[in-house]
Image (cartoon, grey):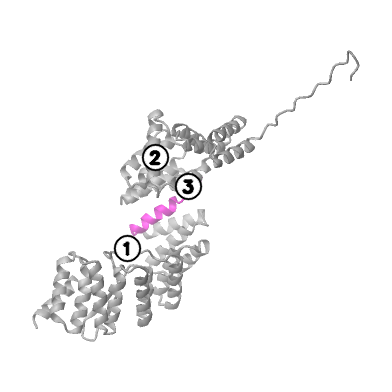
Amino acid sequence: MPPTGTPAPTSTPTATPTLTPKAYLDQGDAARQKGDLDQALASYTKAIELDPKLARAYYNRGLAYEDKADFVRASTDYDKALDLDPNLVFTYNARLDAYSQKTDKLDQLIAACSKAIDTNPKLASAYYDRGLAYYYKKNYDQAIADYNKAIEPGYKLSANVYNRMGLAYSSKSDSDQAIANYTKAIELDPKYAQGRYYYYNRGGIYQQKKQAEQALADFSKEIELNSQFALAYNGRGNFYYSQQKYNEAIADYSKAIELDSKSATFYANRASAHSAQKKYDEAIADYTKAIDLNPPKYPSTYNSPILILNVPQKDGGVVWVYVSSVYESRSQIYLRQQKYDEAIAAYSKEIERDPKYVPAYDNRGLVYSMLQKYDLAITDLNKAIEIEPKLARLYLSRGFIYKNKGMNAEAISDFETFLKLATANEPGRPLVQQELGKLKGQ
């Protein structure tokens, strides 16, 4: 033992290591992932104390507050985070866009934002969030009202709000206001510091308005600013296609496919351009790829077909073939190549996928009629009418098949039913009236 009078040794306290702000941020993320929101909030707060300019800590703390349904504190943190780092707007928007298909989540978001606004009417992010929720619920007027409120307090990310407002006006078919808001976004943020796609969005409206030069300029500018944005190439490709510049369209569709090879839309669009150039093998290959990537989920209705083929018959009649899916587009090419067996097989595949898909029965019946297999044709049209008894064009199709088979009484009955059900501008109305006159005059 120590000599008398010698002080006993004392232990030196071990200092608690101080974590870095980034370490506390990571600690908070791990706790939030486990559902320990109180620990997450404590860690994010410690990170902010050590580094008051750490935008991600405010943003992630906002997420934790939102998880606890404390949207007042969440909105305050989101505002602070976006003020410190406007680039967080992309993460912020992605979070909100993820709500778009969740109606219950949108309703919760609206209620939470409303509560936050009642507490603090100057919370710009709460107005923005609620506006976006209203937009996804297709309440465009209320969305626009909230977007305007988000701008009023001098929201630092106003360019992004104007862009969203343009989308709302576009959804209301107010193209002039849409263009005005996209233009305002561009003026405030010409180098895309706050958002994306302003030029792409405005270019789409210009294309709808047939303002070709402006549309091309905007799509090209979007590509200049955002060269990895596949949809911009697709949009410009659509523009070139509308101008019958098929080589340029194919080049842009191909670039879009290079950037996003999983998009069925890009393959289908390139197939259409190949088809326009009568490069049918290439078109079929692209349509087939589109089908493989995204097998259609068919509706049972067939109310807005697009006339694509007018085939003269030996007796002077016609058969009209309509298209409303990628399968049918591919079948159209088979018909143009007079590959009738392949066309029938394609329509049969559609019926296999959805036994209630009316267009497949309609068009397969018309192909059978072209081959003068009238009984098979009538069987298909009967099935289509059984599924959709009030669809006018089915009676037109079956009426011509009856006429081609010499069943005039049945043809007259179907033509009269067609005229009763058809709209005033329904394709085929003048021709049916002419055919009825001929049949009744016999």
Which mark, by number, is residue 5?
none
Q: Which residue is mark 3?
A: 94
**Reading the chain from its start, which is encountered first: label 2 or label 1?**
2
> Tag 1: residue type?
Pro
Asked if residue 40 lies left or right of residue 358, the reply is: right
CA distance for labels 3 and 1 = 30 Å
| Count of marks, rendered view | 3
Crowd class of label 3 (few under 14; some 14 to 19; many from 20; radius 10 Å): few
> Tag 2: residue type?
Gln
Crowd class of label 1 (few under 14; some 14 to 19; many from 20; radius 10 Å): few
Task: Name the mark nearer the viewer: 3 or 1.
Answer: 1
Task: Name the mark nearer the viewer: 3 or 2.
Answer: 2
Which one is in front, 218 or 101? 101
- Identify the residue at horizontal 49%, vertical 63% (top origin): 262
Residue 402 in which image quadrant: bottom left
Which mark, by number, is residue 299?
1
Residue extending farthest top: 5
The answer to whether mark 2 and mark 1 are in CB contact below 8 A is no
Crowd class of label 2 (few under 14; some 14 to 19; many from 20; radius 10 Å): some
Q: Specify start and end residues of the magenta stretch as a single range.
A: 190-210
Q: Position of residue 50 (x, y in %)?
A: 62, 31
Q: Secondary structure at mark 1?
A: loop
Q: Reply above or below: 58 against 326.
A: above
The answer to whether mark 3 and mark 2 are in CB contact below 8 A is no
Q: Which residue is mark 2?
A: 108
Q: Secondary structure at mark 3?
A: helix
Q: Reply above or below: 413 against 194.
A: below
Q: Could you tell me if residue 56 is visible in this image?
A: yes
Q: Could you tell me if residue 151 is visible in this image?
A: no
